[in-house]
Amino acid sequence: AQRVTQPEKLLSVFKGAPVELKCNYSYSGSPELFWYVQYSRQRLQLLLRHISRESIKGFTADLNKGETSFHLKKPFAQEEDSAMYYCALANGAGSYQLTFGKGTKLSVIP
Amino acid sequence: GAVVSQHPSWVICKSGTSVKIECRSLDFQATTMFWYRQFPKQSLMLMATSNEGSKATYEQGVEKDKFLINHASLTLSTLTVTSAHPEDSSFYICSARAYSGRSSYEQYFGPGTRLTVT
């Protein structure tokens, strides 16, 4: 069964400090991984996906198959980064269901 | 961009009644829609996968007779909570799957519906 683990419920960092949100996964096939973000009172939205290897809002994430990890990083946190972050794993077969981690609340302290 | 709407955004109903939640893809056609449930301060739990013109596929532990899903068109899926009870109170979120290029699909999420059963 596929599983996504986000070990930290809450992560507080000071503005300008580096951020790393951890995500580990368990999946027997070839994984497709995503990071979603949910700002206060807004809908869930895609932040980035591993296959596009892009950087959005200064965030990057590298898929490490050896460590089965997909940690989200940003070198300098901004106050507007405060939000809930969810790591998700796609079932690549057919319907493309997403399995979400429990989420990490990032709080950037001014 | 792809937009998904949900209606209503919040609803209060009495125990024993049924309530219908609509999910619409506004500017694209979605052959597959998903329904999630989110408890306070918890993650999204997939309830069911809805394919246009066919029966929904429910996740283990989700009662299909209680949570009726209809996906009658490429832009509309509905979730009906039948004979609602207070324990059904939750935040229900739908998403619609669309091709996003480069052989990849993306799920676009609705804003959610807050259901309170009294």
Image (cartoon, coloured by chain):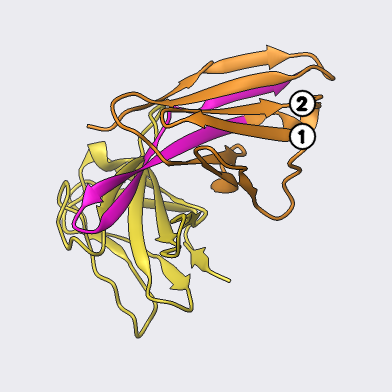
Chain colours: A yellow, B orange
Residue placed most toward the observer, B65 or B54: B54
Picture quarter with the N terminus of chain A? bottom right
Q: Which residue is mark 1?
A: B66
In terms of sequence position, does the residue under pointer 2 or pointer 1 come before the other?
A: 1
Q: Is residue B10 above or below residue B112?
A: above
Q: Which residues are magenta?
A: B91-118
Residue projecting furthest to the right: B16
For badge 1, the amino acid type reads: Lys
Q: Which residue is mark 2?
A: B82
| A6 displayed left or right of B42 | left
Say if residue A110 shows up in the picture. Answer: no
Q: Is residue B81 above or below residue A101?
A: above
Secondary structure category for the residue under label 2: loop
The residue under the point 39% across, 37% down is: B30
Secondary structure category for the residue under label 1: loop
| B66 displayed left or right of B75 | right
Q: Return the x and y of residue B110 as percentages of the image width and height.
A: 42, 30
The residue under the point 73% across, 14% down is: B13
Q: Magenta: predominant secondary structure element?
A: strand
The numbered mark 1 sits on a residue in which chain? B
Asked if disc 2 and disc 1 are in contact, CB closer than 8 Å, the reply is yes
Q: CA distance from mark 2 to mark 1?
A: 5 Å
| A86 displayed left or right of A15 | right
For badge 2, the amino acid type reads: Thr
Q: Return the x and y of residue B79 as percentages of the image width and height.
A: 61, 29
Q: Return the x and y of residue A51 as percentages of the image width and height.
A: 23, 64
| Mark 1 neighbour class, 10 Å CA radius: few under 14, some 14 to 19, many 20 or more | some
Q: How many marks?
A: 2
Q: Is residue A94 above or below residue B11?
A: below
The residue under the point 35% across, 48% down is: A36
Q: Return the x and y of residue B34 as percentages of the image width and height.
A: 51, 42
